[in-house]
Image (tube, rainbow, N blue to C red):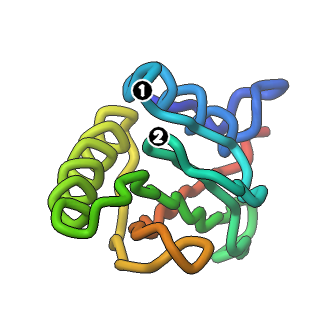
Amino acid sequence: MALNFTTPGSASFRKQIADGLKKSLGRGWAVFPDAKPVNAITRPTVLMERTSFTKPNMGSYQSTYTVLVIGNQTVAETKEDVLDGLVDTAAQALEDLGLIWQSAERAVYNGTNPCYKFTILASNTRKK
């Protein structure tokens, strides 16, 4: 499923990513098209936000998105193994959507949940 960022009237690119991930990852995941705070992570969770917007040349622009993949595992002995599997699954889902991610950095969400932050670059050329 390739995302179309240039169709007039189409959903925002961020929402398109969220909708595609919901389909790809399935009901076991919570996917949010924004970075709103989530108090309790009870299942693998994805949050996203646009982190930059640039104009490399006339008639085009680029947006950088952060996709946060948060683990829900609380048992210390298996937390890292579970997160590794979640990140691999999310990376494949992003690629299945036709997205190229630049990097995924290890982080901690809300001070307790291990996560990875994927960086995605999307370009758009204005059509006349």
Q: Which residue is drawn at 28% across and 55% down?
A: 87
Residue assigned mark 2: 43
Q: Which of marks 2 and 1 is nearer the N terminus?
A: 1
Q: Residue at x 56, y 65 (%)?
A: 66
Q: Which residue is drawn at 63% across and 38% down?
A: 5
Q: Is 71 situated left or right of 42 in this image?
A: left
Q: Is 13 situated left or right of 74 in this image?
A: right
Q: For this rendering, which residue is in front, 72 or 55?
A: 72
Amino acid type assigned to the residue bearing label 2 in the image: Arg
Where residue 71 appears, x then y in whole percent?
40, 56
Where residue 97 appears, x then y in whole percent?
39, 34
Amino acid type assigned to the residue bearing label 1 in the image: Gly
Residue assigned mark 1: 28
Q: What element does badge 2 sit on?
A: loop
Q: Relative to 1, say whether 57 is above or below.
A: below
Q: What element does badge 1 sit on?
A: loop
Q: Are marks 2 and 1 in contact (CB under 8 Å)?
A: yes
